[in-house]
Amino acid sequence: QVQLVESGGGLVQAGGSLRLSCAASGRTLSYAMGWFRPAPGKERAFVAAISWSGGRSNYADPVKGRFPISRDNAKSTEYLQINSLKPEDTAVYYCAGRTSYNGDYYYTAEDQYDYWGQGTQVTVSS
């Protein structure tokens, strides 16, 4: 089992930045990680994902170029730097993880992940 705990959310003005963190504990073998947030019609929509090595990543179109994802495996922590925030970025952001059995891949679908954090609220004021 892997436990994930997010932090770093808060209230920020439009145009501002936050850094979200997701700390993993438990059986933290090689695992890919991602971030999700609610979207119209979806409880959790893909935001960004990163492979175990950190060498591969992928982003949803609305956040490309604004939300770089990274990880520090020595600290068992992944990060989502959220920049140039817009009011429509307001959401609860969920960290997700899954064991990487074969290869260094990222995953973009909610049902591909096995572990979830409880979420961290990001509120962007206009």
Image (cartoon, rainbow, N blue to C red):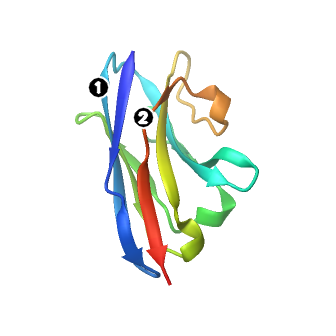
Per the image, the residue denoted by label 2 is 53
Q: Amino acid at mark 2?
A: Ser
In the picture shown, does residue 91 fall above or below 4? below
Residue drawn at x 48%, y 44% is 94
Q: Nearer the viewer, residue 17 or 5?
A: 5
Circle 1 crowding by C-alpha within 10 Å: few under 14, some 14–19, many from 20: some
Residue 39 horizontal/vertical position (percent): 67, 55
**Which label belongs to residue 25?**
1
Q: Of marks 1 and 2, which one's residue comes earlier in the chain? A: 1
Q: Of helix, strand and loop, which one carries label 2?
A: loop
Mark 1 vs mark 2: give the one in front: 1
Front in this rendered view, residue 8 or 80 = 8
Which amino acid, by three-letter code, is at mark 1? Ser
Could you classify mark 2 by the number of other residues whose Cα lies within 10 Å: few (under 14), some (14-19), or many (20 or more)?
some
Q: Secondary structure at mark 1?
A: strand
Q: Is residue 84 visible?
A: no
